Amino acid sequence: MPRPSYTYGVMPTREVFEKAYRAEVADRDSASGLYHMKLIGQDSAAVRGTVFEEASGQSARFTMDEVWTGLKQLKRKLDRGGRASDAAGDLASGILESIGIEWL
């Protein structure tokens, strides 16, 4: 099955996100279904004020709903522009890529 692909800055639908999340995260960690992350440097700055802030400098786990919420928060930062904008967009792109969605 081909990977869903979106223009950079265009969020997938919730349905597409859920399908990709369940396929990828379930394969990696079927016991919990949680998304694991640890952020440092520029990524830590990008997540200030988002649900992902918990992962700044330490390992954290997030539910599918939390990842969706965090992605929307990063997208809002990207849309606002400014210093944190590029880092927020790059981080959102990396998260989407890790669950099988391309953000080109």
Image (tube, grey):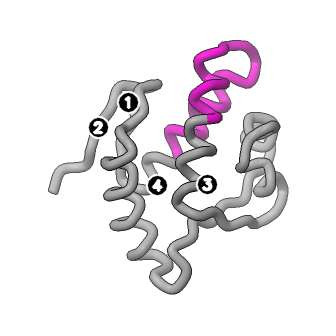
Which amino acid, by three-letter code, is at mark 2? Ser
C-alpha gap between disc 3 and disc 4: 15 Å
Q: Which residue corresponds to the image point at 79% horizontal and 43% vertical from the top-left? A: 44
* Contact check, label 4 and label 1, Cβ < 8 Å: no
**Mark positioned earlier in the residue sequence (4 or 1):** 4
Q: Is residue 95 above or below residue 47?
A: below
Circle 1 sits on which residue? 104
Q: Quadrant of residue 66?
A: bottom right
Residue occupying the far left of the picture: 1
Which amino acid, by three-letter code, is at mark 3? Glu
Please give the count of numbered marks on the rendered protein.
Answer: 4
* Contact check, label 3 and label 2, Cβ < 8 Å: no
Report the magenta residues as a range: 73-94
* x and y, in percent, of residue 98 in the image: 46, 55
Secondary structure of residue under mark 2: strand
Circle 4 sits on which residue? 98
- Is label 3 or label 2 in front? 3
Circle 3 sits on which residue? 66
